[in-house]
Amino acid sequence: MAERRTVLFSGSVQGVGFRYTACRAADGRGVTGYVRNLPDGRVECVAEGGRDEVNTFFADLSDRMRAYIRGREQDTSAATGEFSSFGVRF
C-alpha cells in the first residue's frame, strides 16, 4: 500500500545541499514527490511510495544530512498519486 509522508526538517538545513541530497536519495528508490525550502528556514520534503521505500528514503536522507538536522515534524497519509517523479520545488 502506497503512503504519503511529509517531513519538515529544521536546523541548519538550507544552503547546505539538502534539496540536492534529497533528489539523489530518491533516485532509484521508487519514491515520488518534492523537496523545497520554506521561508521560515525549514525544508519540506514530501515523498510517496511503498512504506518500505519511503522509510528507506527518509532514513538515507536523514543519515546523509544528520549534521544539519536538529528537528523534524512528520505526517503520514494515503498516497495521492499526483507525482510522476521526485524533484525540487521553488
Image: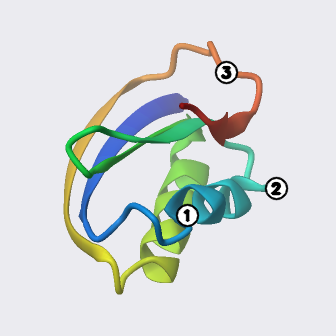
**Within 10 angstroms of label 1, few (less than 14), some, or many (20 or more) residues?**
some
- Residue 25 lies, with reference to residue 66, above or below; the image says above
Q: Secondary structure at mark 1?
A: helix
Query: Residue extending furthest bottom?
Result: 67
Question: Which quarter of the figure has residue 85?
Answer: top right
Q: Quadrant of the C terminus?
A: top right
Give the residue pinned by disc 1. Answer: 56
Q: Residue at x 74, y 45 (%)?
A: 30
Q: Quadrant of the N terminus?
A: top right
Which is nearer the eye, 34 or 3?
34
**Residue drawn 27% across and 38% down?**
39
Q: Amino acid at mark 2?
A: Gly
Q: Amino acid at mark 1?
A: Thr
Q: Which mark is residue 28?
A: 2
The single residue placed furthest to the right in the displayed view is 28
Q: Nearer the viewer, residue 77 or 41?
A: 41
Residue matched to label 3: 83
**Residue 23 picture quarter:** bottom right
Disc 3 residue type (three-letter): Phe
Q: Estimate the spatial distance between the alpha carbons at disc 1 and disc 3, rounded to whole Å.
A: 19 Å
Q: Earlier in the sequence, mark 1 or mark 3?
A: 1
Q: Residue at x 31, y 34 (%)?
A: 76
Q: Visible in this render: residue 41?
A: yes
